[in-house]
Image (cartoon, helix red, strand yellow):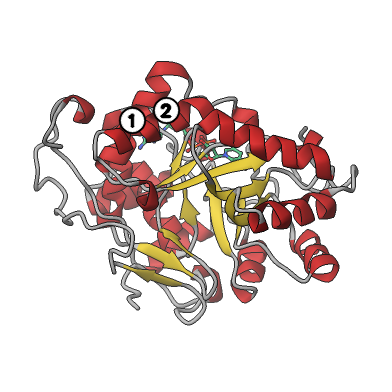
Amino acid sequence: MLNEHRAGTGADTGPTSDQLRISRSAEFHDFPWPAVGDRGYTGRMTDSSEPTYQQSIPTLSTDRYTLPALGFGTYRLWGKSGAQSTETALSMGYRLIDSAYNYENEGTVGAGIRAAIDKGIVSRNDVTVTSKLPGRYHEHDKALSAIEESLYRTGLDYIDLYLIHWPNPKQGKYVEAWKTLMEARDRGLIRNIGVCNFTPEHLDTLEQETGELPVINQVELHPYFNQADTRAYDTEHGIITEAWSPLARGAVFEEDTIVSIAKNHDASVGQVVLAWHRAIGSLAIPKSASEKRQKENLDSLHVTLTSDEVEAINALTKTDGREKDQDPDEYEEF
Ligand SMILES: NC(=O)c1ccc[n+]([C@@H]2O[C@H](COP(=O)([O-])OP(=O)(O)OC[C@H]3O[C@@H](n4cnc5c(N)ncnc54)[C@H](OP(=O)(O)O)[C@@H]3O)[C@@H](O)[C@H]2O)c1
């Protein structure tokens, strides 16, 4: 167990090391760990038989589940270029890939993963593939069909992590969806199950109704909306908190506090934001179509913030800091 990434000791600087462990045990990844700038980064990784850049990613664990501490988002990656971006991300060292039925790119992502496997870049066991159940398919039979459809679209034999995309509490069927995910896991279609956008109240309901909590809860989480309450609940219940829109889709890039911390570290603003996620125990899944920014985001693993810097970024959170006002108690997505 290694906790060197954690900066700060306050209640809002992340879970205790007993609750959440970040490790460089290379459980997933055997790549070397080059210092920033150790290797030249040139050309397209996937055109080269000898990759020019690879980054080992530490793991993040609860007692129930282990994931790479940094993942790769794929929203709006489509078609040939999207498959190429996914393959390139795997070449560089990303091992946690986030897709969803509703992104209409499970085929794209699956093609990128299968190409990487075919070229010997990764083995299937090295990759954690995530997809998500849409709100319109929360009922049992529809949910099972959607999961099977996701499998066909990816062209994979199983999906590692399948999540309920939104709780849609007004529709009121997320418990039925959860029970169906449990069944699909028992049938071997998916390996692990989780949720997105669940509040502590929704999670309590799952536990009361089914006796089982998700292994991860993926929520909107960035410096303007840091989800301290949900993170505390998740940690207490052995749930990994995964951050969607971890860079706030760029909305935080001109924030003076972060710009000035970035200058201190000779790092980019994006790298500082991702280092902050790591420091508070949040698993970020930044999306980038660009090889350069994929690499930049991986290199955030070399940036370690001081506890004061973490606190300064924590202080930027706002009650209305959501990017698109998507409060899961009100907002519904189908
Ligand atoms: N469960 C949910 O409800 C939910 C909701 C939203 C998103 N998600 C997941 O979370 C993932 C990440 O969230 P997101 O895509 O919304 O937002 P994000 O990762 O915060 O930001 C992505 C944007 O930032 C740019 N970018 C990436 N790295 C950068 C860097 N180092 N410097 C400057 N710009 C950079 C990207 O452009 P380029 O591509 O041009 O680099 C893209 O426009 C999604 O892709 C999706 O997988 C889940």
What residue sits right under mark 1 in the picture? 115
Where 163 falls versus 306 (above or below)?
above
Which residue shows up at 37% across the image and 55% down it?
A: 275
Give residue 330's quadrant in the image: top right
Give residue 241's quadrant in the image: bottom right
What residue sits right under mark 2 in the picture? 111
Which residue shows up at 47% across the image and 25% down it?
A: 108
Which residue shows up at 20% across the image and 45% down it?
A: 54
Give how far across and how far down residue 331 sits, in percent.
80, 39
Q: Secondary structure at mark 2?
A: helix
Q: Which mark is residue 124?
A: none
User: Are the two marked residues, 1 and 2, in contact with CB atoms closer than 8 angstroms?
Assistant: yes
Quadrant in the picture for the N terminus: bottom left
- Mark 1 and mark 2: span between their CA atoms? 6 Å
Image position of 317 (left or right of 287): right
Quadrant in the picture for the C terminus: top right
Give how far across and how far down residue 81 sits, in percent.
38, 19
Q: Residues within 10 Å of mark 2 (few under 14, many from 20)?
A: many
Compare residues 125 and 62 and report the one nearer the observer: 125
Which residue shows up at 68% across the image and 51% down it?
A: 184
Give how far across and how far down residue 198 sits, in percent.
72, 54
Image position of 22 (left or right of 35): right
Q: Residue furthest bottom?
A: 18
Where 79 falls versus 139 (above or below)?
above
Q: Amino acid at mark 2?
A: Ala
Compare residues 12 and 65 and report the one nearer the observer: 65
Q: Amino acid at mark 1?
A: Ala
